[in-house]
Image: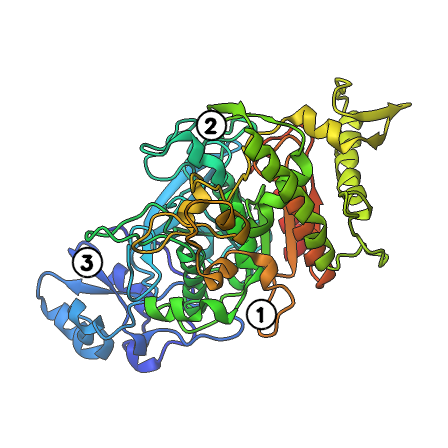
Amino acid sequence: MRVLPMAHDAGVPVNCYPSGSAAPHLPRLLHGVSFSLWPTPPECRPAATSTSKVINTPLIPTLRCGTLLLASLATQVPCLAQSASPASTSHASPLAFDAAKFAVKKLSVDGRSVSYRAYEGLVTVANPVDARYQSLNFYVPVEYYEGKTVGGYTADSAPIFFPNTVGGYMPGLAGSPAIGSGPGLPGGPGPGMPPRQLPAGVPPHELSAGGPPGMTAGPDLDAKPNAMALALSKGYVVAAPGARGRTLKDSAGNYTGKAPACIVDLKAAVRYLRLNDALMPGDAEKIISNGTSAGGALSALLGATGNAADYTPYLKALGAADTRDDIFAASCYCPITNLDNADAAYEWLFNGLNTYSGRGVQGELSPDRIDLSRKLKALFPAYVNSLALHAPDGTPLTLTPEGTGPFADYVKALVLASAQAALASGATLTGNEGITVKDGTATTVDLAKFAAFITRMKATPAFDDTTLATGENNLFGTAAVDRQHFTRFAADHSTDHTLADAAVVRTMNPLNHLGQPGVTTARHWRLRHGTIDRDTSLAIPAILALRLQNTGSQVDLAFPWGVGHAGDYDLAELFAWMERISR
C-alpha cells in the first residue's frame, strides 16, 4: 500500500511517539519492509481544535515480519504496540470516520488533472435498513493532505458540496465525480437507470414524480464534468449521499423507502458529517445541498427543516448521530415539492387545456377530469391567500377567486424577466408565447396563452391521482401498502379513500416548517425552474421562494428561458453563487 504524504501532527500526545521522533517518519524508517496500515487509536490522535482539523492522523504500521528493530519500536511507542491488531479498534463508534480507508483517484476538468481521495460507502447510521442507500461517498482534493490550498480554500475552510442523485422519489445511490455519468443530475442516474432510458419496471405514467435522472429536457451533459468533478477542481469537499426511495423492499417483502425515508436518510448523512467534522476536511457549517426534480425537492426539504422535531423518531430508530442536521445553503433545480398543494397549483396554470402529452403518455381529459380541474383551480386562491405572501416592499401577493391578482402578476414578472434575458442574449421569440415585445423589450405576458404554448403534460389530478397511478401515490405508501392518497380532495373523489398519515405528509413539505420554533432554515437558497418545465406549476417554486424570503432567507430565483425539466445545466452560474455566499 502506498503511503501518501502527510501534513503536521500537532496536538498528538507525546507518549504516542518515541522520544525525538514523529510517527509520520516511521514509513521512512521501515523502508522496504512489508506492512499494512491501521488507523491510530483514539488516544494517539491529534486533539481537535477550533482552528485546525485532524485530517492526517498518523497511520501505524502493523508488521508482518518480526525483527529486533521493529520490536524495539513497538516497545518505545506504546500506541504502536497497542495497535498491532485491528481488534484494538473494535470499541470505536460505528459512525466514526476512518481516514485510512480511501483510494486516490484522478479526473480531468477543463484540461486540468484533479486528484482526490475517495472515501466511498460510508454508512451514515448505526442501524441501517438498507446500507446500499444509507451511505455517503466523500471526496477530498489531495492538496488538503499536503497542507496546500485549492481555490483559496483550506482543509478547514472548504465548503462541503452535498448533491443527491434522487429522481422521481426513486432510490438514489451515492453519486460520484465520474465524467459522463448522466445528463441533468449530479452523479448521474440512479441504479439501473442509464441516461435517457426509463428505469426497468416503472411505467411512464409513474414518472409524474419528477422523472428519473436522465429524463431531462435540458442540455446534454454526457462526457462533461459533472457538478461534483467541478466542485473538486474548485476546492470544495464533496459529500454525496444516497437515499432510499419509494420502490425499495426488504427480504420479507416490506416496503422500506416510503416517505419520509428519503429525507431522513439525507438528514442522517448531514449528521454524520457534523459528528465527524473534526476528523474530516471541509467545513460542516457550510454544507451546500444540490438536487434536481424530486432531488431538488429533497434539497429544499433539507434546507427548510434543519433540526425539526418531526424527524427525530425516525433518526433515532436508525441510530443516526445525535447532533444537528441544519445546512448552510440549498440549491434546488425544478423541485417537485409542496405535493399536497401541487394539484391545485397545476390546474391554476393549465385549467382549460384538456390535451396532455409527455414522457410517452398522451390523451384527452375526460369530462369527469375536466370537472376535477375546475374544482382544483378554484381551491388555489384560498391556499395562496392563507400563506400571507408579500413582496419585498410589503405588498400582499394575493389572488382573487378567479385566480388573478398580485400573485399572478408576480409569476408573470418572472416569466417576463426570463424572456427579456433571452432577448438580450440574441434569442428570438416565436410569437406564440403570449408575450408582447415592443422595441426589443418584453412588456406583457398572457399567462393562459403562455401555458398553452408550453402545453399540459399531466392529467388531472397531476400528483394525487384518483386512481392512485402516480409516483407520488407510491411515495406515500406504507411498509405494507404500496400506494395511498395524500390529499383529502383526491381521496374524496376516489373509490379508494385510503389516506396517508397527515404527520407523514407534513414531513415532505418544506413550507410546513419555515419559521417554526426549533427549526433552523438554511440562510441561502438558489431555485431554478425552466420556463417550459411542465412537471409542476410555475407557481410552486414562486411560492417557495416567497415564503423563504418572507421568513428571512436570501433567495436567488429564476425561470431560465427555454429550459425544461433539468438540472445542473448552468454550472458556471451555480458555482459563482456558491462562491459569493461562501467567502
Q: Is residue 76 left or right of residue 447?
A: left
- Check disc 2 and report the residue beneath it: 222
Closer to the eye: label 1 or 2: 1
Picture residue at 35% right of the left edge, 52% below the top: 257
Picture residue at 9% right of the left edge, 66% below the top: 67
Closer to the eye: label 2 or 3: 2
Question: Distance of mark 1 from mark 2, alpha carbons?
Answer: 39 Å
Quarter of the figure with residue 510? bottom right
- Check disc 1 and report the residue beneath it: 519
Picture residue at 15% right of the left edge, 68% below the top: 70
Q: In the rendered view, would you say 178 is above or below 164?
A: above
Q: Which residue type does callout 3 highlight?
A: Ser
Q: Relative to the observer, which residue lies in front, 168 or 323?
A: 168
Q: In the rendered view, would you say 535 is above or below 39?
A: above
Task: Categorize mark 2 by other alpha carbons within 10 Å: few (<14), some (14-19), many (20+).
Answer: some
User: Is any atom of residue 150 visible in this view?
Assistant: no
Q: Is residue 423 left or right of residue 355?
A: right
Verify CB contact (< 8 Å) between mark 3 and mark 1. Answer: no
Q: Secondary structure at mark 2?
A: loop
Q: Earlier in the sequence, mark 1 or mark 2?
A: 2
Q: Secondary structure at mark 3?
A: strand
Verify CB contact (< 8 Å) between mark 1 and mark 2. Answer: no
Counting from the top left corner in percent of width and height, residue 511 is at 61, 58
Question: Distance of mark 2 from mark 3, alpha carbons?
Answer: 39 Å
Q: Which residue type does callout 1 highlight?
A: Val
Residue that lies at the very extreme toward the left in this rendered image? 66
Which quadrant of the rendered structure holds the C terminus? bottom right
Q: Which residue type does callout 2 highlight?
A: Asp
Question: Distance of mark 3 from mark 1, alpha carbons?
Answer: 46 Å
Q: Relative to the observer, which residue lies in front, 396 or 301?
A: 396
Q: Relative to the observer, which residue lies in front, 35 or 310?
A: 310
- Check disc 3 and report the residue beneath it: 36
